């Protein structure tokens, strides 16, 4: 995404992400904008010098188990800059999932380390994962949050370590009301739109009209209803009190129904192998940052 598209996404679109995750995105964007202003006369960035994406490529191990790494902020059609920061493009997840199926993987492990991300592609990818006809597990020792949880909830089982973070089932539109600032600067928002366009100026000014806020609230609620509906269809044991946007530690996630088991990667992997009818000759070090 070009910078203006990133700004639009960060401040003017619904997100499926934890508060900490979005705060990190904001800090990175503000730092990038500061550098952009300082480098107005600099040469355009050469994409060929970008750092390689640290996200590990999908692979099938010697036991026939496929692995997909979902890390960082999840988005759709990410650019080289976003990927070089270790974020995950949901389009890559789709491509890798299809490749693992073509390679006749006997089971698939999703290694998740993500606070969530944008909405684009998440409902579609979660539906594809839910239709998987071989055992599909998700495991984390860090965080499965929001958009990442939407994807992980498609798995047969979710495993986590006691100190990990799981949940954040909710949608946020991270708007900042700038009315007080505009008033201090003597600015008045006076857009001219067509008579029918009561929503057209939404996001252009310092605040929303009541009608605009109601429309945005409706969209946010509709996204949450879809999110919640999918999760409940896959995991009906979840206590509804834990679907209010909060995250919980791993040792509470199982009791809340957000996860199935506590354990290290080796534990989850052994259980996946058993479910896949595989006798593991070895356990891969999936945390290693190998690239093909």
Image (spheres, grey):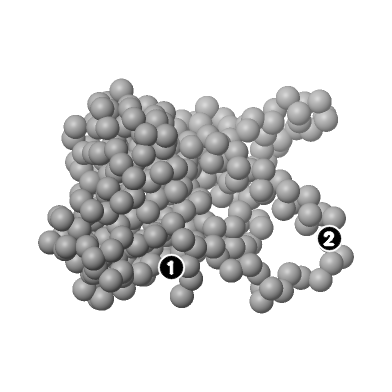
Helix, strand or loop for disc 2: loop
In the rendering, at what x and y percent does residue 283 appear? Answer: 31, 60
In the rendering, at what x and y percent does residue 120 appear? Answer: 43, 54
**Is residue 181 left or right of 252 when viewed as pictured?**
right
Of residues 158 and 23, the one nearer the viewer is 158
Distance of mark 2 from mark 1, alpha carbons?
33 Å
- Quarter placement of the N terminus: bottom right
Residue in the image at 46% along x and 53% along y: 71
Q: Which residue is mark 1?
A: 57
Q: Of all residues shown, which one is farthest toward the right?
A: 41
Residue in the image at 47% along x and 67% along y: 290
- Is residue 197 visible to us here? no
Of residues 42 and 167, the one nearer the viewer is 167
- Is residue 105 visible to us here? yes
Vertical order, 13 against 87 (above or below):
above
Residue in the image at 25% along x and 39% along y: 261
Vertical order, 97 against 136 (above or below):
below
In the rendering, at what x and y percent does residue 58 appear? Answer: 38, 67
Helix, strand or loop for disc 1: loop
Q: Which residue is mark 2?
A: 39
């Amino acid at each position: 995404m070009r910078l203006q598209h990133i700004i639009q996404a960060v401040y003017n679109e619904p997100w499926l992400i934890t508060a900490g995750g979005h705060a990190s995105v904001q800090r990175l964007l503000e730092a990038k904008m500061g550098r952009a202003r300082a480098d107005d006369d600099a040469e355009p960035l050469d994409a060929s010098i970008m750092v390689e994406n640290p996200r590990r490529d999908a692979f099938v191990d010697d036991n026939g188990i496929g692995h997909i790494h979902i890390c960082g902020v999840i988005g759709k059609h990410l650019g080289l800059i976003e990927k070089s920061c270790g974020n995950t493009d949901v389009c890559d997840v789709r491509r890798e999932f299809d490749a693992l199926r073509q390679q006749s993987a006997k089971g698939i492990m999703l290694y998740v380390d993500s606070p969530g991300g944008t909405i684009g592609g998440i409902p579609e990818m979660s539906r594809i994962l839910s239709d998987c006809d071989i055992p599909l597990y998700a495991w984390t020792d860090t965080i499965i949050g929001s958009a990442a949880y939407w994807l992980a909830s498609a798995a047969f089982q979710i495993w986590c370590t006691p100190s990990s973070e799981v949940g954040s089932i909710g949608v946020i539109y991270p708007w900042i009301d700038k009315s007080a600032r505009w008033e201090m600067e003597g600015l008045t928002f006076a857009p001219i739109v067509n008579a029918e366009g009561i929503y057209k100026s939404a996001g252009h000014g310092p605040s929303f009209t009541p009608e605009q806020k109601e429309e945005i609230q409706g969209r946010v609620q509709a996204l949450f209803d879809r999110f919640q509906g999918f999760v409940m269809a896959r995991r009906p044991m979840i206590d509804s009190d834990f679907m209010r946007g909060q995250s919980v530690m791993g040792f509470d996630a199982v009791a809340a129904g957000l996860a199935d088991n506590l354990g290290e990667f080796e534990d989850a992997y052994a259980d996946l192998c058993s479910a896949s009818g595989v006798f593991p000759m070895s356990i891969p070090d999936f945390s290693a940052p190998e690239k093909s």
